Amino acid sequence: MVVRQRPLGKTGLFASELAIGTYGLSGDGYGPVAEEDARKVLERALDLGFTLVDTCDAYGAGKMERIVGEVTKGKDVVVVTRGGLDRTTDPPRKRFDEEFLLARIAASQKRLGKDAIDLYLLHNPSADALAVGGALETMRKAKQKGLVKRWGVSAGDIDVGRLALEGGAEVISMPYNLFHSRDLHRLAGDVMVARAGVLVHSVLSYGLFGGDWSKEREFPQGDTRNDRWSRLELEKRIAQLDAVQYLVHDDVRSLRAAAVRFALANHLVSSAILGPRTVEQLDQLVRETGAGPRYLPDTDLAELPRSLERVGIPS
């Protein structure tokens, strides 16, 4: 199988519309994953035709960059990494000053085994870090010096995304899913004017759109989802899934499939980052995504805003 390719904005690159993310493989968020198993997932993704791998210098304290570098060595793959988190303090803090960023880029180059990083993203900076902190200028310098081939910003909200695009970011990465789509929709005009590539993450909302959680679902100690949702918030989100169950019909075989197809139905999206932790999960996601490019029926997409509004989710 060859996963379909899409242009990565104005970068001149094409990337698979499904990308492999490595946060879950790092063991940081959802529990330990053996290094051997992480390698198997990455190798399987490449076998399936994935040509974009997304990682971060903070995942596994740099372990995932090393693994990604080893697995992708000599292969025609776009490797994306992120930086901006200082883990030498307790708790860790965000840093986007020039000295820190250039040091992190150098460390990432070494772990990835690359003289120049394919695509480097500032990892969830604040608007202030972009507007007055000099982070964008640092990235422009890093590209001029040949440390990175392309750069962008992982943006947590519309304000950061707009500042990134205005500052010359070639790619932005944003959360985007059935319940969280407003920011990217509102940035559509800015993205088109900037001709930026768009990576989307949190497509399955940390597993919520697996569609198989009960309201009594509990996560093990150390699982990041314990901090993300209170018990009431989790119960509310699970109840809201009823609003999108109508998407599951015909060749859309699961809510999980509908969630991935929803992301790919947006023509602005260059690649949807998936985070399977096992080869079986990866195969299931690819199989259920389907052949496209008519990912969801137009009538279903047109109904979505009204269906979400009925359960209190603005679209």
Image: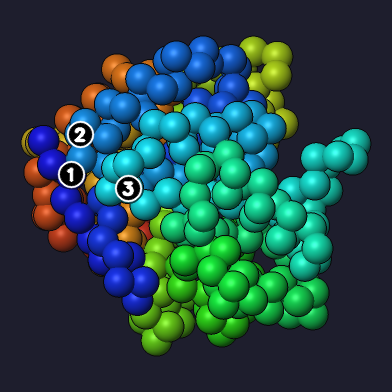
Corner quadrant of residue 203: top left
Q: In this view of the protein, which residue sits in the foreground, 50 or 247?
A: 50
- At mark 2, the secondary structure is loop
Residue 108, percent across and down? 61, 47
Quickly name the residue at label 1.
Answer: 3
Q: Of all residues shown, which one is farthest toward the front?
A: 115
What residue is rendered at 44% in x and 58% in y? 118
Badge 2 amino acid: Leu
Badge 3 amino acid: Val
- Does the rendering let one see residue 304? no
Q: Is residue 272 left or right of residue 98?
A: left
How far apart are labels 2 and 1 at the CA level? 7 Å
Instruction: Mark 2 vs mark 3: give the one in front.
Output: 3
1 or 3: tag closer to the N-terminus:
1
Corner quadrant of residue 236: top right
- At mark 3, the secondary structure is loop
Q: Is residue 60 left or right of residue 79?
A: right
Q: In this view of the protein, which residue sits in the foreground, 186 or 78?
A: 78
How far apart are labels 1 and 3 at the CA level? 13 Å
What residue is rendered at 68% in x and 79% in y? 137
> Image height check: is 144 above or below 294?
below
Q: Quadrant of the C terminus?
A: bottom left
Quickly name the residue at label 3.
Answer: 77
What residue is rendered at 11% in x and 35% in y? 1
Quickly name the residue at label 2.
Answer: 48
| Pointers 2 and 1 in contact (C-beta within 8 Å) | yes
2 or 1: tag closer to the N-terminus:
1
